[in-house]
Image (cartoon, rainbow, N blue to C red):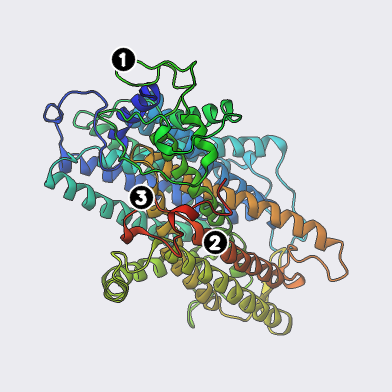
Amino acid sequence: MGEKEEGKTTMKTLEKESMENNEEHVTESDHKINYRGWKAMPFIIGNETFEKLGAIGTLANLLVYLTTVFNLKNITATNIINIFSGSTNFATLIGAFLSDTYFGRYKTLGFCTCTSFLGLIVIQLTAVFKNLHPPHCGKESKTCKGPTTGQMAFLVSGFGLLLVGAAGVRPCNLAFGADQFDPNTDSGKKGINSFFNWYFFTFTFAQMVSLTLIVYVQSNVSWAIGLGIPAALMLISCIVYFMGAKIYVKVKPSGSPITSIVQALVVAIKKRNLKLPAEPPMLFNYVPPKSANSKLPYTYQFRILDKAAIVTPQDKINQDGSAADPWNLSSIQQVEEVKCVVRVLPIWFSAILYHLVIVQMHTLLVFQALQSDRRFGHSNFKIPGASYNVFLMLSMTLWLPIYDRIVVPFLRRVTGKEGGITLLQRMGIGIFLSALSMLVAAVVEEHRRSLALTKPIGMQPRKGAISSMSGLWLIPQLALAGLSETFTAVGQVELYYKEFPENMRSIAGSLFYCGMAGSSYLSTFLISIVHRITAKSAMGNWLPEDLNKGRLDFFYYMIAALEIMNLGYFLMCSRWYKYKETSSSNLELNQMPKQSETSTISV
């Protein structure tokens, strides 16, 4: 008896596309694949470094560009950035599916890197040619002419090209680098781990350069030059990538594991009126001999999905034991794999609310900085508003090695757990820190506004008075946000990687980006609603152009309240969460006994 020939054939071939099993989907032995390992790394790491410098160098200061060059209102520019960020993150799921199913990572990365270059060129042209952006607005001007429909259409076309580029680059670049190493040898495994370290180093390096040097050129020298530098870097990224074409291991597309998930859900819906057998062994239990995924034990959560594994007289079985029609019968192993995904979704929703804090740090905080004293020490040098986010990144960079080398070993001795604390505990700490970050942000904003009204040091054109509060007071909230990222964001990625079936790990990475997309969309919704409702209130608009006339601190308190509620929701989900593994080392907070595994979030 068996089920998933088609579903599991997809899974079997997709096993090679996981981080640890990322080799050719053909059945030939691995010794026929010529792994070049580190010989391919100069091209791959070079491509990734220049690609990140190009992308981040443009996106880091885009909010300021929209408000100063395109003369958009703060709220309009913020919502555009949030929608664009959300769309690029959500598009990674589509990119991963197309890469896995049709094009393969090599072609996807090559095409999308070139597309990103074209997008950066389009955006740079809006700064170069006067007829592609609104007339310059002088400092003394109280009103400025906004962009025409044609100017906005040209700019949005650049955003669209960047979106297509991000859809393929983000889910594929890390996996493509890992493809170059033999995962079945010790040297290959070490090479993969070392490559991951280099990958995140290049990301940190790109953020540092982009948030400092490139942003400074854009804000203080020339937007045309400042946007031209990332475009040039992206062109170098394209050239470097194709220079290594002859030595890359190119994993062939082999189908998406999403098919297997959809099959089990469709079959469960078809058989929803059937009665479950008294014992799980009576369910269809075929497992392909070369399945990519580890054998999963039966769980009592979401039992309604078990109906997909009920064998009816109409179901036909192939001679090898697999289901003749995987759209009418699923294996209980396949159902358990779907449960792994479904089980993570409540945690994923909590992560959407968590990332609201990080979204504010990349948008509204920039406006706070612009109306603060940005002078560095007693010099006349002013820190660009977008550059303050470098402190969030520095907080992450400094804390991660401390956590890994000092905190984890200490906690491991205390708790006996390999990671010191469980993944959900780690994420919970991060959510608490995010709420604390918003509370600090609200207090600092109240102080900034008070000094702006009583002791201003100048005027920000078309915005309002510049507060005498030093912009360095924004560092504590950024540092707390960075700490929360090291707990929740890193823990979230690790949770998805470990909890998803082995052949769905590329989808797991896309799910992380989709969560960030949800945060961007939610932030857009909240800002729009608060802006509209408070504009009609007696207290006045919380989010006007001039922050000194609004109450941004109230908005931050609202986000902090949402994070506190989110923490309660997260703890409730954690209480009943069941890990994919059943060993005691992987049991989570307040793990329920086997017969009590049907929780309030179970069916």
> Mark 2 or mark 3, which is nearer the start of the sequence?
3
Q: Which residue is mark 2?
A: 570
Q: What separation in Å lies between label 3 and label 2 (alpha carbons)?
A: 19 Å
The percent coordinates of residue 314 (x first, y second) are 49, 15
Q: What secondary structure is found at the residue carrying circle 2?
A: helix
Q: What separation in Å lies between label 1 and label 3 (alpha carbons)?
A: 34 Å
Instruction: Check the image and report above or below for 136 versus 37.
Output: below
Q: Is residue 310 left or right of residue 441?
A: left
Amino acid type of the residue that numbered disc 3 sits on in the rendered structure: Lys
The percent coordinates of residue 557 (x first, y second) are 67, 71
Q: Quadrant of the N terminus?
A: top left
Instruction: Check the image and report above or below for 295 versus 565.
Output: above
> Mark 3 or mark 1, which is nearer the start of the sequence?
1
Q: What secondary structure is found at the residue carrying circle 3?
A: helix
Q: What secondary structure is found at the residue carrying circle 1?
A: loop
Q: Quadrant of the C terminus?
A: top right
Q: Which residue is mark 1?
A: 319
Q: Is residue 455 left or right of residue 520?
A: right
Amino acid type of the residue that numbered disc 1 sits on in the rendered structure: Gln
Q: Which residue is mark 3?
A: 498
Identity of the residue drawn at 75% across and 49% down: 145
Identity of the residue drawn at 38% across and 17% down: 317
